[in-house]
Every structure is written in C-alpha cells, then in structure tokens.
Amino acid sequence: MKALIFKNKSFNFEDIDQPVPTKDEILIKVINTSLNAGDYRLIQFNSGLPKTGILGNAIAGIVDCVGVDVKDLKQGDRVVVDTSDAGFGGLAEYAIAKASSCVSIPDSVSFIDASACPVASTTALQALTLFKTIKHKDKVLIVGASGGVGTFAVQLAKHFGAQMTAVCSAGNVDLMNQLGADVVINYKKDDLHALNETYDLILTINGAYPLSLYRKLLNKDGVYVMVGGPIKQFIMNMLVCPIYSLGRKKFRILNSKSNPNDLNQIIELVSEQKIQPYIERVYPFNEAIEAFKAFEKGHSRGKIVTQVSDH
C-alpha cells in the first residue's frame, strides 16, 4: 500500500506492506484523514513519532476486515476514529484501529466531514465542558476562533445556548458570523484590554495575551481553559494557573483525550445538521506534503483534509 512516511526529518511516499489487525482491531480502507496540531507537534519536536512514521490521527473510511473478537463491526461499515493513542497511521491507504475506538458514520454524513471531527471537535467539546456544561445565556469568549478547534467550539457554544464572542483576524470575521457568533472581535483592530464585559468561560486556542487579562475578563466564578498557544506561554501558564485558581476563578490547561463517546456525540450533531465542520481545503493524497506545509503556517480556516482514497 502507499503511505506517507516521516523519517529523518522529511516526508516521502513509500510502498509498504498492508497492516494486519489483531483480534480486537479492524483494518480500515482510509478515505479521508484530516490534519491536527498533534501531527505538527510531532514533526516540530521530531520526537514521539509513531514507529511506522505514518502520521494522521483523524481517520474516516470503510472497514476492510475485522479481528476475530470484533462483533459490532463488519466489512463494509463506514467508520470514523481518533488514533491519537494508537499509533496514528491515517496518511496511508489502510490503517489499523481498535474496534472499541471506532464510531459509525451515518449515511447523511460524508467521509470528508467525518474525518474533520476527531481531535478538533472533541477537544472543543471537552474544553467547553471541562468543569460543567454551559448554561443557557452563559457568556463565552473564544480567542483563536477560526481554526479547527475554534470553528467547532463556536458552534458547540451556540448549540449549548451561550452568548458567544469570537476573537479572530479581520479575514475571518465573516466566517465567525456565519458560524453563529453573537459578537466578533478583530484582534488587529480592537484591543481586548479595553473590553468592559466579563465572561463565564474563556477558551484560548491561540493568541499570546497574559493570564492577568483573562483574570480581569472572567466573572467571579468564571473559568479559563487553555487549549493551545505559543509554547513559551504554555509553559508559563503551567506554573501560574494553579496560583490563579486559588480563588473562585479557575484556570486550567486542557489535556484532551481520545474519547469515542465524545466523538459519537459530535457525529450525531453533524448528522442532525446542528453543527457543520468547516473545511478550508481537501488535498489529494499525492499533495499531502503540501497540505502539511499549509497547516504549519498556522493560519488555516477550519480544517485541512486529505483525500487518501476514493470510496
């Protein structure tokens, strides 16, 4: 099978043997795989790479064969899976996954849309519900709202009934309005330090604002959750968040986890057209290296997806 292999700090397409599932695994014919921050970080630090060298942890495809102990899936089923904890492997024509990690894709959901959901949407869901589910009319501020996690977070916050404020660049203001944001702040034009509002939840996916600003913008029982941002800020917040959380306001860094129940909830919402993955571009598999280069620039709108195979 054809696979995109990362080794010696570079990508190359190679023909390798097709993997064989163990008794509790399935073999997936990969149709689409979306890129996520985890892929980029492994490349950036050149450590923690899967043994196969095959990245891609957000996979949608068709079950090709199943292990002897697999009872709930069969050949031909449409599935989506997050393989973050199981060796990645999505940037290849076939991939292995634990059957228990897979979620069925309804006929109403395309492979492209399904592949955009693992990791990004579940990270958004976990960030928005880290302490408690958002209540109707809660005020939510999302900084860095136009990327993969952010576009899901905006829609999920609105689904939960929040009053949603999105922070993004000028080029993404229309997108935020399209996704349902109540207020959109262009960070290049408007100064967050001048805001007079306070929020029940602040979710930061990007941006280098200090924690002192977010503490000012939280209401007395507010929660701050950091999902992403500059490495230097991430390290600083690891040290400072526990100190800032000594009072009623809480500050946390999210360590998102692969969770098939969360993914199933997202897929159901997509099937019911209550949320919609926003996809910037679908790259053919032979242009997957170019897809990574586009992703590494850090300015993608929504998700970048690769078309690994046809149906």
Image (tube, rainbow, N blue to C red):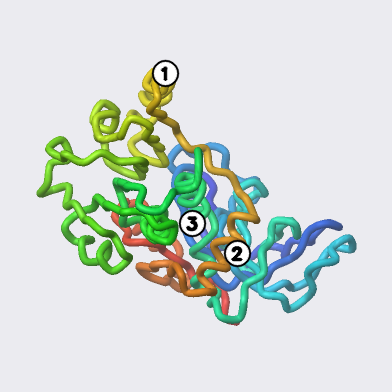
Q: Residue at x 45, y 47 (%)?
A: 128
Q: Residues within 10 Å of mark 3 (few under 14, many from 20)?
A: many
Q: Mark 3 or mark 1, which is nearer the start of the sequence?
A: 3
* Circle 2 Cα neighbour tier, 10 Å, few/some/many (<14 / 14–19 / ≥20): many
Q: Nearer the viewer, residue 228 or 157?
A: 157
Task: Kindly tell me whether residue 139 is visible in this rendering.
Answer: yes
Q: What is the residue that sits farthest to the right in this orientation?
A: 68
Task: Give the residue at x 63% y 53%.
Answer: 83
**Where residue 310 appears, x then y in whole percent?**
57, 80
Give the image quarter of residue 114.
Answer: bottom right
What amino acid is at disc 2? Ala
Q: Which residue is mark 2?
A: 92
Residue type of the residue flagged with mark 3: Ser
Sequence-first tag of 1 and 2: 2
Q: Residue at x 30, y 34 (%)?
A: 218
Residue at 49% in and 64% down: 116
Q: Choose mark 1 or mark 3, whichever is in front.
A: 1
**Residue that numbered label 3 is attached to:** 121
* Disc 1 target residue: 246
Q: Position of residue 77 (x, y in %)?
A: 71, 75
> Which is more toward the observer, 216 or 149?
216
Give the residue type that dot 1 points to.
Leu
In the image, is residue 125 above or below residue 210? Answer: below
| Closer to viewer: mark 1 or mark 2 | 1
